[in-house]
Amino acid sequence: MKNLVIRLGIGAVALTLAAAATAASAETLRWARSGDSLTLDPHAQNEGPTHTLAHQIYEPLLHRDMAGQITPGLATGWKALADNPNVWRFTLRKGVKFHDGADFTADDAVYSFNRAMMPTSAMKELLTSVKEVRKVDDHTIDMETNGPNPLLINNLTNLFMMDAGWTEANGASAPQDVAAGETTFAAQNTNGTGAFMLESRVPDQKTVLKANPNYWGKGTFPLAVSEIIYTPIQSAATRVAALLSGEVDFIQDVPVQDLGRVGSQSGLKVVTAAQNRVIFFGMNSGKADLETDNVSGKNPFADVRVRRAMNIAINRDAIKKVVMRDQSSPTNVIMPPFVNGWTSELDAIPAHDVAAAKALMAEAGYGDGFSVTLNCPNDRYINDEAICQAAVGMLGQIGIKVNLDAKPKAQHFPMITNKTTEFYMLGWGVPTFDSHYIFNFLVHATTENRGSWNNTGYDNADVNAKVVALESETDLDRRNAIIGEIWAQVQEDQLYLPIHNQVLNWGMKDGINFDVQPEDQPHFKYLTMN
């Protein structure tokens, strides 16, 4: 079987920061970003900042390092069995302990994967091909799939291992049901194997982590940080001010308008890299009648001509220049260049053409336009609300009056997964570095185990079948051909409105040595200080 693992060669805030600065030592890292983790339950949300905090506390079997390469985590070896290519065998790391002192064993790994496949898990789509996970011995597990799955390895880097005994004892056997508004013990407490342990947490205010004194990675990682003080600061101006004043040491999202200011300040630096994330708009084209528009009895988004008109009405170059200050890469496909399946032809943006867009609108019967609500986050992506505001003006030029409703991500994301928004912004990173991840979450029709973020109403039987087929296709050429066929159909159907790929800008003190990770995952165990 071919191994297809994809690799990559102010007020309350000010008071909180002031207190943190007083307590800081040379080994304390004071970290800020625009938004907080949504939960501490490692299987409840598939969201970047939530994974970022989880990676400090919990660990997966396989790990992507600061260069994006897959490396050993809690597994030291893995292989597809020669006599049964449907089975991957994992050798687990010995001598690993959870933060409460319990040993990490195969029982915990089997338990964690089974938990991650439960209905309330946001991670279950990464395991749709898994038939069974079983223990071989205390430090070996087998994962059997429904047919050979050459991409299984890529799917495991954000699937965290939990202590089965701790989880059961605290009534958290099922992942937190975020959509139902549930709060659980595991959503507020942790017991991982990671380099840092939870000391205290006030959501959306401050989280304090302490170094794990019994971490298995001593001698393998620098482990220069003994304490992390994490402060979400939604206001860009306040976040930058905190870095400039020395109240924080590291901010994960330097606003594009402040890059020069931060980079030129003595004692600070900005580290930049392209991100494995694309920003786009989604439209519910499958609904019979929209609730937020002014058109009675039908859905304007259901007509592909309207969707194509919207696509060419959006001036991506203007967004790049004016909104993003040249810190973005315009695109016409919801796939970053890091991803297997990307081509320059798919990426090429269409010409911005208001006249042609108006003609398409008229041809579709909407020459007079219509109104609709756009839901947008205001604390998740770089200049997210400003991008939405720009799109409102651009779509207005072709008669679409857009009512912008911007909310924090904690309120925004449930509208997508609960299918209650009809027009929305979303950003998508691809931790597997393969198109299947995009297809499984965003293109396949919504079912029990697939399409959880597909709020478009799209349901193409042929596409659905091809998405599933990718999970067991071991011939690389045939697999890539299927990927190309799916993208051709997605583009033909104008399923989404791609905007751009993000550029990451991390701001930090000069004494910190830390390269930008392409998934925007600062694994602080790698950080060193001068």
Image (cartoon, rainbow, N blue to C red):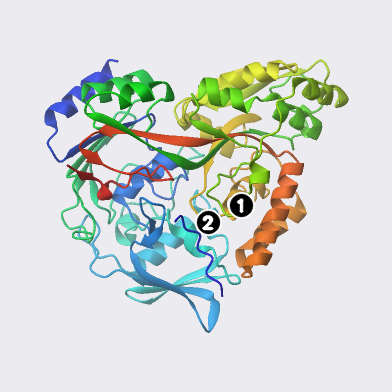
User: Where residue 175 sits: x, y (%)?
Assistant: 44, 50
Q: Is residue 498 visible?
A: yes
User: Where residue 516 sits: x, y (%)?
Assistant: 37, 42
Identify which residue is drawn at 71% across, 45% down.
490
**What residue sits right under mark 2 in the picture?**
126
Identify which residue is drawn at 35% across, 18% down.
237
Identify which residue is drawn at 69% across, 54% down.
484
Kind of residue at badge 1: Asn
**What residue sits right under mark 1 in the picture?**
440
Kind of residue at badge 2: Leu
Pointer 2 local density, CA inside 10 Å: few below 14, some 14–19, many at least 20: many
Pointer 1 local density, CA inside 10 Å: few below 14, some 14–19, many at least 20: many
Q: Secondary structure at mark 1?
A: helix
Of mark 2 and mark 1, the one earlier in the sequence is: 2
Query: For the N terminus, which image quadrant?
Result: bottom right
Query: For the C terminus, which image quadrant?
Result: top left
Front-most of 71 and 402?
A: 71
